[in-house]
Amino acid sequence: MSPMAIGCVVFAVVFGSAILAMSLRAVVPEHHLSSDSKDVVKLGVAVVATMSALVVSLLLASAKGSYDTRNREFTQMSANVILLDRFLAHYGPETKEARDLLRRSVTDALDRICLSNNFQLPMLAPTTATSQSIYSQIQQLSPRDEAQRTLQGHALRTAVEVSQTRWLLYEQRAGSAIPMPFLVVVVFWLSIIFASFGLYAPRNATVVSTLCVCALSLSGAIFLILELDRPF
């Protein structure tokens, strides 16, 4: 499911639990709604709310860390592609074919991104033949002096780094820092909290609107966490 769909499900479950609890208030025995019962419920909900806040914070930190890591890897790969092109340019006109192949690879990747309605890392899917072809062309160069020999060595190392980073990002495309059972438990806790709100809340438009806004805020937070966890 997409982050937007999961966010909508979270909103429906959390807000629905509050509305359901408000509806059940009419059939709950009066002694269950006494001030003593309300105090005990408040204490229990406070414990659940504390755990929920802690877990949501952990989820956000985990998603942000995952996003930052992939962003650094993507930026590093882009910088290495530019650096590889510069090494080949400084080497001399002998590298024209390798540079053209490198640029076609990047251009094709960008075209696939523009044409893709659902970005599933099309530009990161490594093309083994292309990577090997570029590496082979660089390896087959015949340096005439020490400067070209140095540039060839730098270009080979950079080409390997680009390929390694692409494979790393490609393999990470389906990974998630947010386990689904973890998310289900958090939503369950939030439902309990909102059900306790609805059980003792009066039935009027102000209360319903407030609960709706709170549920929308929480579902938006879950949506943002999932978006950070799936940057591509």
Image (cartoon, rainbow, N blue to C red):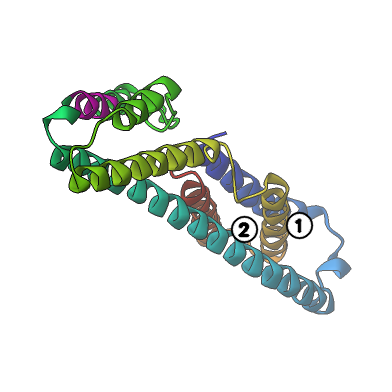
Residue 100 within the segment the image draws in magenta: yes
Disc 1 and disc 2 in contact, CB within 8 angstroms: yes
For mark 1, give the secondary structure.
Answer: helix
Between 94 and 72, the one lying in front of the other is: 94
Q: Which residues are magenta?
A: 97-105
Q: In the rendered image, which quarter contains the N terminus?
A: top right
Q: Residue at x 16, y 28 (%)?
A: 94
Instruction: Point out the residue furthest to the left here.
Output: 93
Residue 98 at x, y percent in the picture: 24, 27
Q: Residue at x 41, y 50 (%)?
A: 73
Q: Residues within 10 Å of mark 2 (few under 14, many from 20)?
A: some
- Quadrant assignment, res 42: bottom right
The answer to whether residue 127 of the structure is visible from this angle is yes
> Does residue 89 appear to the left or right of 34 in the view shown?
left
* Kind of element beneath mark 2: loop
Q: Which quadrant of the figure contains the C terminus? A: top left
Question: What amino acid does circle 1 point to?
Answer: Arg
Q: Going 42% across and 37% down the picture, which residue do you hit?
A: 163
Residue 37 drawn at (x, y percent): 83, 74
The residue indicated by pointer 2 is: 203
**Residue 53 vs residue 123: left or right?**
right
In the image, is residue 48 above or below residue 98? below
Where does label 1 land, which residue? 25
Name the foreground residue: 26 vs 58.
Answer: 58
Q: Residue 209, can we see it? A: no
How many C-alpha atoms fall within 10 Å of the one at disc 1: few (<14), some, or many (≥20)? Answer: some
Identity, as a three-letter code, of the amino acid under mark 2: Arg
| Gap between marks 1 and 2 measured at Cα | 10 Å
Q: Is residue 95 above or below residue 213?
A: above
Q: Foreground: 183 or 37?
A: 183
